[in-house]
């Protein structure tokens, strides 16, 4: 260490003598400057004292108690000449740095005061030079930095616990680099949990958020893992630069409420040591839950909450005897224009296994108008992964996995965008028939008033539904494009509720669903026809081992549907459907295409092959105005009792090519008895095996019309029907 460096360290240390411990190994410093300091000590009655250094390089006299005066503040270099020399005296010259006297001359010094932690900084009186703090707490090596003394807080928040600290005597210590980083405010990486007092970093992170203020930027520490025990409540316009930080829910902490008065924000608990100020808690009593409450203060076993404790249903009761435990959404964005980027939210589901509800045990809760949430991983939620309310929010580049509840829960959304999302293994409780969480719906689940949205490029695997609970409370005008669902209990769940009429304008395009049981478009049985869901469109949709079930719906338009199944009970079914169409269907396997109790439905441009059931198309139970045209049905080895088409009342079968071999009943069977206009079979080309009728009219039927068909086997008419212009070309 240089002569000048020793002098700077020594003198400045002496100015803060009482702040630095004296338990380090004694080391005698044999330099001229050290001798001058020893001589100066002797002159002040401290002869025989030993000059020592601590591990950080600070010099001090062991057991001396010597304190030198606060540095002299000067306006110019020329004023140095008027100051009497005294060994160790420091003078700060405006715009020219600091100088130290060795008893004979002034020596320019750098500002080298180093402190171990923020606690020492708070005890430091006014200094002219910047001070370096090694870390927020001892030995963690982050959260520190350079600080400069200022007379008045320039940020306007006073001592905020991160960028500004009150000095010992007057004024403040302010960071030279003003940033809102949780580690600047005392947040501790989980690898540093050797400090027993740091259960979580909740309060520290919230201090950082509060200090940043509206439209401030919070820059998380790169790659840190922060244990969190409460809601982190963001302010309007704030930006979260996550830097791949992980915010991890703390292992559930719980105790019992020993005393509470109805309507009070004070509770007395059996063990207050399990909780910290800043944590969020929920109470459970008689199977009912309270809202989530932040702990504002602790006084012995008494906790002060943010608000009077109330049940979720709004009832205000005494919670004496209730379980009380940590639980909350981890990040809460209620104010508008909030942005979160590059954050991992870990719900620690394994260690928060019980007493979960969708209302309070999720990871991200947002009502932020124009909120943007991007490049996030949300894992292991004990409840909902994302609860997204508000107008015009954006979710983009998000991975969600291993959650007990819905992946994304939508509600009261006026325009929203969900783009490039991967959701795997969610609704884990519901998939095990446990519905205690509430509001189970799917990887993407709708609540009321979800409209005007775009869901694009989403992959879902193992969920209750890819998209569930589109339920008719103004769930309108939503577009779903490039969705893939794999191994879900449902592909889509679109259900018009009784007493509502808002389910309309739903568009699903360019999507694929594999092993998802069924794609359901329906209306509740108590819904009148005038209130059926309307204008629902599917275009370029693949259904693989996934039934398409459409019932009690008006104006469903299907375009370019590919259906394939190895399951005999997998089918396409229309029931009580009106004013709808299916155009360009390719169907391979499965049971059949069924059209029952429908009116004004058109099936066109289809290619159906190798059905596993006893027919390809069934309209036998239709009530009227069904058109089947411009398609083909092929089956090289049909099962016994097979029919290509089973036609019902007011069905027109036109320009259909049928080629089947095997023990079929017939190519087309018509089955209507007394309708004035039953089934019309027109301009069809029907090829069946030997002795299998091309067309068969069921016993007792009448008013069926068979017009200009090309057949290779005779027509069998067991009723009183009309055959006109058939061209019989036997093989």
Image (cartoon, helix red, strand yellow):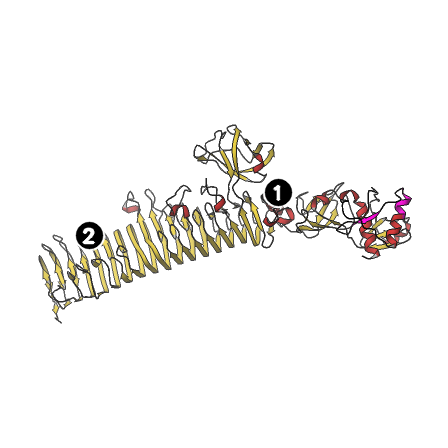
- Name the magenta segment's main secondary structure: loop
Task: Categorize mark 2 by other alpha carbons within 10 Å: few (<14), some (14-19), many (20+).
Answer: some
Q: Nearer the viewer, residue 66 or 472?
A: 66
Q: Is residue 318 visible?
A: yes
What is the secondary structure assignment of the residue under circle 2?
Answer: loop
In the picture, the disc for residue 196 is: 1
Q: Which residue lies at the image location 8% right of the left edge and 58% below the top edge?
A: 718
Q: Which quadrant, please, contains the C terminus?
A: bottom left
Q: Earlier in the sequence, mark 2 or mark 1?
A: 1
Q: Is residue 578 magenta?
A: no
Q: Is residue 57 magenta?
A: yes
Asked whether, in this view, residue 353 is left or right of residue 700, the answer is right
Q: Give the x, y percent position of residue 571.
A: 27, 56
Q: Which residue is mark 2?
A: 621
User: From what the image shows, is residue 22 above or below residue 645?
Assistant: above
Q: Which residues are magenta?
A: 39-58
Q: Is residue 74 visible?
A: no
Q: Give the x, y percent position of residue 548.
A: 30, 55
Q: Give the x, y percent position of residue 597.
A: 22, 51
Q: Which quadrant, please, contains the N terminus?
A: bottom right
């Amino acid at each position: 260490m240089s002569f000048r460096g020793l002098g700077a360290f020594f003198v400045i240390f002496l100015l803060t003598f009482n702040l630095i411990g004296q338990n380090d190994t004694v080391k005698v410093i044999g330099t001229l400057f050290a001798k001058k300091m020893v001589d100066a000590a002797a002159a002040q009655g401290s002869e025989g004292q030993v000059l020592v250094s601590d591990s950080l390089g600070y010099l001090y006299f062991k057991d001396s108690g010597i304190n030198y005066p606060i540095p002299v503040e000067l306006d110019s270099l020329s004023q140095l000449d008027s100051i009497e020399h005294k060994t160790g005296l420091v003078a700060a010259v405006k715009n020219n740095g600091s100088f130290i006297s060795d008893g004979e001359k002034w020596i320019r010094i750098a500002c080298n005061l180093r402190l171990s932690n923020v606690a020492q900084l708070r005890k430091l009186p006014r200094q002219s030079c910047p001070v370096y703090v090694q870390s927020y707490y001892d030995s963690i090596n982050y959260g520190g930095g350079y600080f400069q003394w200022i007379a008045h807080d320039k940020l306007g928040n006073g001592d905020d616990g991160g960028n500004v600290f009150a000095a010992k005597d007057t004024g403040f210590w302010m960071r030279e680099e003003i940033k809102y980083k949780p580690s600047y405010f005392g947040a501790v990486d989980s690898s540093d949990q050797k400090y027993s007092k740091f259960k979580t970093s909740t309060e520290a992170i919230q201090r950082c958020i509060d200090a940043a203020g509206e439209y401030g930027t919070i820059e998380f520490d790169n790659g840190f893992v922060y244990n969190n025990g409460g809601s982190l409540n963001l302010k309007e316009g704030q930006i979260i630069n996550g830097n791949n930080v992980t915010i991890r829910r703390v292992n559930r902490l719980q105790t019992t409420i020993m005393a509470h008065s109805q309507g009070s924000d004070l509770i007395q608990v059996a063990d207050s040591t399990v909780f910290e100020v800043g944590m969020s808690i929920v109470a459970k009593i008689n199977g009912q839950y309270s809202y989530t409450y932040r702990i504002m203060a602790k006084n012995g076993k008494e906790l002060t909450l943010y608000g009077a404790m109330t049940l979720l249903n709004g009832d205000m009761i005494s919670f004496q005897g209730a379980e009380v435990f940590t639980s909350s959404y981890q990040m809460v964005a209620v104010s508008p224009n909030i942005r979160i980027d590059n954050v991992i939210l870990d719900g620690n589901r394994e260690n928060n296994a019980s007493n979960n509800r969708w209302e309070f045990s999720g990871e991200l809760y947002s009502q932020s108008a124009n909120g943007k949430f991007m490049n996030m991983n949300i894992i292991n939620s004990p409840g909902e992964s994302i609860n997204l309310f508000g107008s015009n929010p954006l979710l983009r580049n998000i991975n969600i996995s291993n959650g007990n509840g819905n992946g994304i829960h939508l509600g009261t959304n006026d325009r929203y965008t969900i783009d490039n999302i991967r959701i795997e293994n969610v609704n884990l409780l519901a998939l095990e028939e446990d519905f205690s969480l509430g509001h189970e719906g799917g990887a993407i689940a709708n609540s009321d008033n979800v409209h005007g949205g775009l869901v694009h490029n989403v992959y879902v695997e193992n969920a209750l539904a890819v998209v569930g609970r589109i339920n008719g409370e103004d769930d309108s005008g939503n577009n779903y494009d490039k969705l893939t669902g794999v191994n879900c209990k449902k592909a889509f769940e679109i259900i018009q509720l009784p007493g509502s009429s808002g389910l309309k304008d739903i568009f699903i395009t360019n999507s694929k669903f594999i092993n998802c049981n069924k794609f359901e478009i329906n209306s509740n049985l108590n819904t009148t026809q005038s209130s059926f869901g309307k204008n629902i469109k599917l275009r370029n949709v693949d259904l693989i081992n996934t039934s398409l079930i459409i019932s009690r719906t008006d104006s469903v338009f299907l375009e370019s549907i590919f259906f394939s199944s190895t399951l005999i009970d997998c089918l396409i079914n229309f029931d009580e459907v009106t004013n709808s169409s299916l155009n360009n269907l390719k169907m391979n396997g499965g049971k059949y295409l069924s059209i029952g109790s429908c009116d004004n439905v058109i099936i066109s441009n289809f290619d159906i092959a190798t059905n596993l059931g006893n027919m390809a198309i069934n309209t036998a139970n239709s009530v009227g105005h069904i058109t089947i045209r411009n398609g083909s049905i092929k089956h090289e080895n049909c099962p016994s009792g097979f029919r290509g088409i089973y036609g019902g009342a007011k069905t027109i079968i036109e320009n259909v090519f049928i080629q089947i071999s095997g023990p079929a009943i017939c190519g087309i069977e018509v089955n209507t008895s007394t309708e004035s206009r039953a089934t019309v079979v027109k301009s069809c080309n029907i090829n069946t095996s030997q002795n299998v009728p091309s067309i068969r009219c069921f016993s007792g039927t009448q008013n069926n019309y068979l017009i200009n068909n090309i057949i290779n086997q005779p027509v069998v008419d067991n009723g009183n029907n009309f055959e006109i212009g058939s061209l019989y070309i036997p093989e």
